[in-house]
Amino acid sequence: MSGARSLMLALENQGVKHIFGLPGGANLPMYDELYKSNIRHILVRHEQSAAHMADGFGRVSRKAGICFATSGPGATNILTGIATAQADSVPMIAITGQVPLNMIGRDAFQESDIIGMSNPVVKYAFQPRNASDIPLTVKKSFYIAETGRPGPVLIDIPKDVQQNVADMEFTTKFKIKGYNPWIMPDIIQIEKAINMLISSKKPMILAGGGVIISSAFSELQAIAELLTIPVVTTFKGKGAFPENHPLALGPIGMHGHAEANKLMTEVDCVLAVGTRFSDRSVGTFDDFEKRLKIIHMDIDPAEIGKNQTTSIAIVGNVQTSLRMMVQLIMQRKLNQITNCEWIRHVKEVKEYWRDNLKIHSGEMSAARILRKLRSVLPKNAIVTTEVGQHQMWASLFFDVIKPGTFFSSTGLGTMGWGFPAAIGAKVASPNIPVIDIAGDGSFNMTENSLATSVLENIPVIVFLINNFSLGMVAQWQRTFYNRRMIGIDLQNCPDYVKLAESYGAQGIRVESLDHLEKAIKTSLKSDIATVIDIPIDPEEDVLPFVAPGTSLKDMILPS
């Protein structure tokens, strides 16, 4: 059979039901076979959105999302989406067309060296040179993308390789030299970690995105409750632990919760689970690590000691590691361990900041509208965000109650990610409401995905916090550049209600909390995409704020 035909069969054998893509000259043979297959094609309006949709699908389903693009600009357009998935450890397989083999390196029409361009931002890249190589390439790609620390894989297939006919073997047995993703945690290290946590006077759990990736929610909660340890998260780890739990303190970092940042400066031991200690989470690295012992638990040994000195390292799948820790604690038959003085102090600090943190006084402040959203949305609703002020307000004021239902572009911080990712998430969970918390600047970048949402019957909600500007840039210009404002004014354009309606979606503009509640309830009942346009004060800042190059103790608070 042809290479393109074997590609479709190989994808079907992997259980693929959906592909997000855009056809072009160099991938038409695979599209011709896609036409004959049982796989649903979801047509995007830009290849970057195809990657973001596959990304959202991958985060929710925990299986690789698939995106297609043609050669040249089609392939380069998905690079931002691939890099986003790599930064956030998301399983994805991007399949691109390429010019014929004999034209590679000759500056052919729509040729780009996508293998060379993508190598820094993929887990692996393949370019099969023979049609018979395609089935095994697909098998290896899924294995690499979905095992160990997940990530994106690129398969770049020259057009003639798609067209060539060959004998195919669809094997289930293979080895990838040098790739060993399964590392069993060391039980001795886990025992040491338990002893260190029990002996600490002010312990804390720091949960990162690895908890969500490995679905280690119940194990994490069990550790926190057995040892009575408070839990903070990174922003990527937001939703790893129920934020209405008595031990929950919320995210730390640049725009973390005041109580979380305050208490994080006091701890003497931290169990860090599935986190890379990014600068946005811990501030200055040296100041963070010099005052506490760190137990670092991660599937990727390259992360251990990369940013922070580690006292105890536990390498392996974090769900497996936490499960072993729970079993070892329970084997000791200890009564529930409670450091009463520390827990009492944590409660006092939490209550103080929850009661005394000042918020914007207007009725339609970010805090009030996001708390209204939380009160109306079902607990299991899936939330994505764009990138900007609205994203950080969501970190502060939108509590995640059901673990694993909140997703954002954190590592790369890709504007325009949230809306197409919400579409991918809805494909993965069609019976659950999906909402994108958006800002006008970020939504503008991929608003053409409204066409995909409407025409493909994938209804999602855009909760558009509209301050008529590139809000985070404006905040930095106000704070660090003496209000020298340039390049941030979006001038009340477009009219988002009319924009939504022009695509056949529903648009609603709200100016009060009561109207907002009605709009959210209307959108939850709608069978088409809805854009809720929520104008807010352009001068409202995101606070608390830890400025770049400073530590958590230097947190800027609202006055």
Image (cartoon, grey):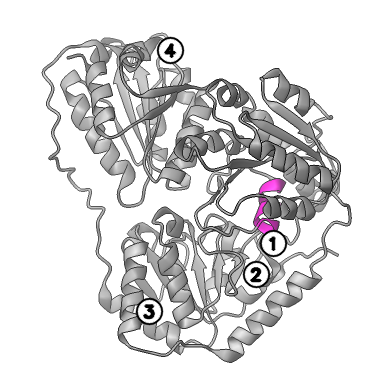
Q: Is residue 499 above or below residue 390?
A: above
CB contact under 8 Å: marks 2 and 3:
no
Magenta segment, which residues? 389-398
Q: Looking at the picture, which amino acid does disc 4 mark?
A: Gly
Tag nearer the camera, 1 or 4: 4
Q: Which label belongs to residue 193?
A: 3
How far apart are labels 2 and 1 at the CA level?
9 Å
* Residue 393 part of the magenta segment: yes
**Left or right placement of residue 240 versus residue 490 in this view:** left
**Quadrant in which residue 489 is drawn:** top right
Residue linked to disc 1: 546
Q: Dot 4: within a 10 Å radius of its alpha carbon, few (fewer than 14), some, or many (20 or more) residues? A: some
Residue linked to disc 2: 261
How far apart are labels 3 and 4 at the CA level?
54 Å
CB contact under 8 Å: marks 1 and 3:
no
Q: Secondary structure at mark 4?
A: loop
Q: Looking at the picture, which amino acid does disc 2 mark?
A: Asn
Q: Dot 3: within a 10 Å radius of its alpha carbon, few (fewer than 14), some, or many (20 or more) residues? A: many
Tag nearer the camera, 1 or 3: 3
Residue linked to disc 4: 24
CB contact under 8 Å: marks 2 and 1:
yes
* Residue 90 part of the magenta segment: no
